[in-house]
Image (cartoon, helix red, strand yellow):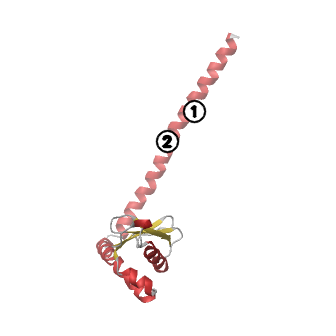
Amino acid sequence: MTLGLLAALVVVGGIASVRGGEEGTTEAKPDKKAAAPAEDAEPQSGAKSGAKAGSAAEDGKQSAKSQTEQFKAHIEETGTAQQKEAAKYVTSVTGADKRNDIMDSAEIHTDYTGGLTGPHNGDGKLLASAFATWKHSKNGLVTVYDAEGQVLSNGNY
């Protein structure tokens, strides 16, 4: 019986030592694999975008400033009379230029008040639907906010 107990302890000890070694090895492998692509990616992006870095920063500033104007222009061209009226209350549009088709989100800020239960919920829906005709994504969500930062409406785009 003592010999069986001793054999069981040896087996458990052997399994524990092998298991402990695998965990250390498993942790080290992903770090090495992750480090190699990151090192490869940095020189490529730096070399390719060296000349473009300045223009990309300028484009980012320009598009951040003009998203609201672009959205309003889209509504003026293709929107209904109600959407055109609602567009007068839009103060800013953000996130319209950032898309990855995994989970895209954009925000429309307005001068309206009252939140979801207020009198301008329908206007928020009009703006969300106008946004959906302007931008397209597999998994996009546009949220319309009132002047106090409360959610007025949302919709998919």
Q: Is residue 19 left or right of residue 153?
A: right
Q: Nearer the viewer, residue 121 or 97?
A: 121
State the residue position of label 2.
Answer: 27
Mark 2 in CB contact with mark 1 (< 8 angstroms) = no
State the image coordinates of residue 101 (x, y, percent, origin top left): 50, 68
Asked if residue 126 is positioned above or below residue 101 in the image, the reply reads below
Q: Is residue 2 left or right of residue 59?
A: right
Secondary structure found at label 2: helix
- Mark seen at residue 19: 1
Q: Is residue 5 left or right of residue 128?
A: right
Q: Is residue 62 visible?
A: yes
Q: For the residue marked with disc 2, what is the amino acid?
A: Glu
Dividing the picture into quarters, in which one does residue 121 lie?
bottom left
Secondary structure found at label 1: helix
Q: Is residue 142 visible?
A: no
Q: Residue furthest bottom?
A: 77
Alpha carbon of mark 2 to alpha carbon of mark 1: how far? 13 Å
Q: Nearer the viewer, residue 72 or 85?
A: 85
Q: Residue furthest top?
A: 2
Residue at the spot x=49%, y=80% of the render? 133
Q: Nearer the viewer, residue 47 or 146?
A: 146
Q: Quadrant of the N terminus?
A: top right
Q: For the residue marked with disc 1, what is the amino acid?
A: Arg
State the image coordinates of residue 96 (x, y, percent, origin top left): 41, 73
State the image coordinates of residue 38 (x, y, percent, origin top left): 42, 56
- Mark seen at residue 147: none
Residue at the spot x=62%, y=24% of the render? 12
State the image coordinates of residue 79 (x, y, percent, origin top left): 45, 86
